[in-house]
Amino acid sequence: MFRRLAIVAAASLAAVALPSSAYAADGFSPPVTVVAPPCATTPGSADAAFGAGTIRGFAGFNACSHSIYYVQGGTQGYTRQLSPYRGVVLGVDADETATYLVYLMTDAAGHPSGIGVTKRTHGGTFNPTRVLSTAAGHQVVTPTADIGAENGRWWAVWTEQVGPGGEFAPQQLFQAKTYGTAADHQQITFTASNVDNTEPSISLDGNGAVLAWTRRTAPEQPGPADLWVATNANTAWSSRVFSSDGTDNRTADVKRISGFTFLAFVRDGRIVEAENTTGAWTSHVFLTPGDGPRVGTTSGSQFVAWTTGNGVFYARGNNGSQSFVGQTVSAPGTTLDTMVTANGKGTLLIRSGLRLYSITSQTAI
């Protein structure tokens, strides 16, 4: 595979006339509250996925004794349930059997104790937490993590600091899984002491796993960061540099669906989308700057959303076409927690003050 992506420059979606083949701008459903506990006085963290016909996820609120809520629903409303878990939501996925959570475990005061993985069955049972790492909860750098699920099995990836160096000890990636051959606390990156491996994003389908992450040189400066991608069909990871253009490639979101891979990440403040549905990698750079991108696909369309200084920006286009139409869909000061795509629509979970709410695209073709 090639080292560098061929990037196609894109005109600002909000400032130019769209080609006649592009979609018209989507409409959106009215905002629906996902969860807004009365104890919330500071924002938290949330993630969600589509499983067994509905949107399902977990949302944490630091000021509520670090409580984590289970939520499910859609445009007709959400139900929410206080879970037995406390901490910071790091990643969520869902399949036809359960909703899976990887999180930084804490006590009610917020003192971390490690990385854990658990699930809530669609029948309503909260499973006990499986501790993946206690080291990750007692280190200077806050860990990042993600989880993928398929057919009742899961695959988690997270970061730990390894070796000497105190607060500057390098971060490496670790994995645990029940998908395929079971594994427990396995280190999967082995780079030099001046290189960090962080911000993993993982996705599963019947062909195995795809993993994207940030690899940064001299993080204490900070130095340049490349985006790496690896695949694993349940044998070993095969990795490569995916993007080293510019200076700072980071915060990737990856989805693997029916053997095709969809990526969104930040390069030097711009959002980049890439996918391989045509058999070769194609990509698109959005001129609307931002952070925290999410990517998804459904019914032949692909969706990208991210947080900007003016609110949440949302774009949709045809798979393989690299022609998008987009718009700002929330007020300044709001942030995107996650996006779920299903049934031809994109649902955005947006944090506004102390409330987490959702809006769903109403496709206009």
Image (cartoon, rainbow, N blue to C red):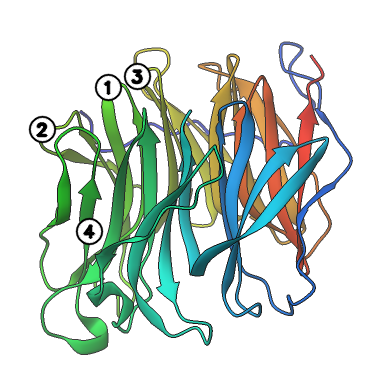
Asked if the residues shown at circle 1 and circle 3 are in contact, with their CB atoms under 8 angstroms apart, the answer is: yes
Q: Which label belongs to residue 259?
A: 3
Residues at marks 3 and 4, CA–CA distance in whole angstroms = 24 Å
In this rendering, the answer to whether 365 lies above or below 359 is above
Q: Residue at x 70, y 37 (%)?
A: 347
Residue 319 visible in the displayed image: yes
Which quarter of the figure has residue 361? top right
Mark 1 vs mark 2: which is more N-terminal?
Answer: 1
Residues at marks 1 and 2, CA–CA distance in whole angstroms = 12 Å
Asked if the residues shown at circle 1 and circle 4 are in contact, with their CB atoms under 8 angstroms apart, the answer is: no
Mark 1 vs mark 4: which is more N-terminal?
Answer: 4
Residues at marks 2 and 4, CA–CA distance in whole angstroms = 17 Å
Judging by the rendered image, the residue that carries numbered circle 1 is 207
Residue 325: x %, y % from top left: 72, 29
Front one among 359 and 198:
359
Residue 326: x %, y % from top left: 73, 35
SS label for mark 2: loop
Judging by the rendered image, the residue that carries numbered circle 2 is 235
Residue 250: x %, y % from top left: 41, 55
Please name the amino acid that badge 1 sits on: Asn
